């Protein structure tokens, strides 16, 4: 694998429910909007706050799982790649967009509990080679962290 340096971890709260759509070819894609707050004390001793909003794109099984599992207000951890793109709007102006192409999305367990449930997708787009009955091998003794 080539060295990849374009990774971001972004933690925040969903501003809306994930929006699940399908491309013309039937590929699922979910769009999530995540807000992250940063608080600090300024030089004048006053509390300051800054909110950063990021659009996140998730594809295929990740898109379906995120849209079924997450909802507005949930705190999430997103790991992915920063993507900058541009398009022309209706007024023929170039608009630049910075977003995250998600590799992983998970609920944050800092202030919540979650339970994981393995999904069985019957389509061939899954990462397990298309087998809907894929069972991961158990970890070796040296892989268990406790």
Image: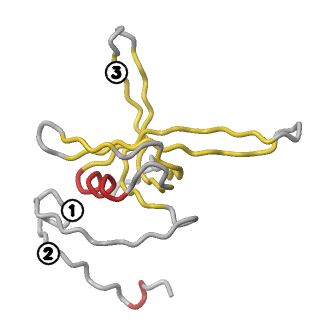
- Decide: few, some or many residues near mark 2? Use Cα within 10 Å; few <14, some 14-19, many ≥20: few
Q: Mark 2 points at which residue?
A: 133
Is mark 1 in CB contact (under 8 Å) with mark 3? no
Q: Quadrant of the N terminus?
A: bottom left
Task: Name the outermost residue toward the right.
Answer: 44
Which of the two discs, 2 and 1, labels the residue nearer the N terminus?
Answer: 1
Q: How far apart are marks 2 and 1 (CA)?
A: 12 Å
Q: Mark 1 points at which residue?
A: 127
Of tags 3 and 2, the one toward the viewer is 2
Q: In this view, does 124 lie to the left or right of 146?
A: left
How many marks are shown on the rendered structure?
A: 3
Judging from the image, what secondary structure is the residue with disc 3 in?
strand
Residue 140: percent from left, percent from top: 35, 88
- Residue depicted at x 41% and y 84%: 143
Judging from the image, what secondary structure is the residue with disc 1 in?
loop
Q: Distance between the residues labelled 3 and 2?
A: 41 Å
Residue 113: percent from left, percent from top: 49, 70
In the image, 106 versus 88, the foreground residue is 106
- Decide: few, some or many residues near mark 3? Use Cα within 10 Å; few <14, some 14-19, many ≥20: few
Residue 33 falls in image quadrant = top left
Is mark 2 in CB contact (under 8 Å) with mark 1? no
Which of the two discs, 3 and 2, labels the residue nearer the N terminus?
Answer: 3
- Residue depicted at x 35% and y 59%: 69
Q: Distance between the residues labelled 1 and 3?
A: 31 Å
Residue 142: percent from left, percent from top: 43, 88
Q: Vertically, is 37 above or below 124?
A: above
Which of the two discs, 1 and 3, labels the residue nearer the N terminus?
Answer: 3
Residue 137 falls in image quadrant = bottom left
- Decide: few, some or many residues near mark 1? Use Cα within 10 Å; few <14, some 14-19, many ≥20: few
Is mark 3 in CB contact (under 8 Å) with mark 2? no
Q: Which mark is residue 87?
A: 3
């Amino acid at each position: 694998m080539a060295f990849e340096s374009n990774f971001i971890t972004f933690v925040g709260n969903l501003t809306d429910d994930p929006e699940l759509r399908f491309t013309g070819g039937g590929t699922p894609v979910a769009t999530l909007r995540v807000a992250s707050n940063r608080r600090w004390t300024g030089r004048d001793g006053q509390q300051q706050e800054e909110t950063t909003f990021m659009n996140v794109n998730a594809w295929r099984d990740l898109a379906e799982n995120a849209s079924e599992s997450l909802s507005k207000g949930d705190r999430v951890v997103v790991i992915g790649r920063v993507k900058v793109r541009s398009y022309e709007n209706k007024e023929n102006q170039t608009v630049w967009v910075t977003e995250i192409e998600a590799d992983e999305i998970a609920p944050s367990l800092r202030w919540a509990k979650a339970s994981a449930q393995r999904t069985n997708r019957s389509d061939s787009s899954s990462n397990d080679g298309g087998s809907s009955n894929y069972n991961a091998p158990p970890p070796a003794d040296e892989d268990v962290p406790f």
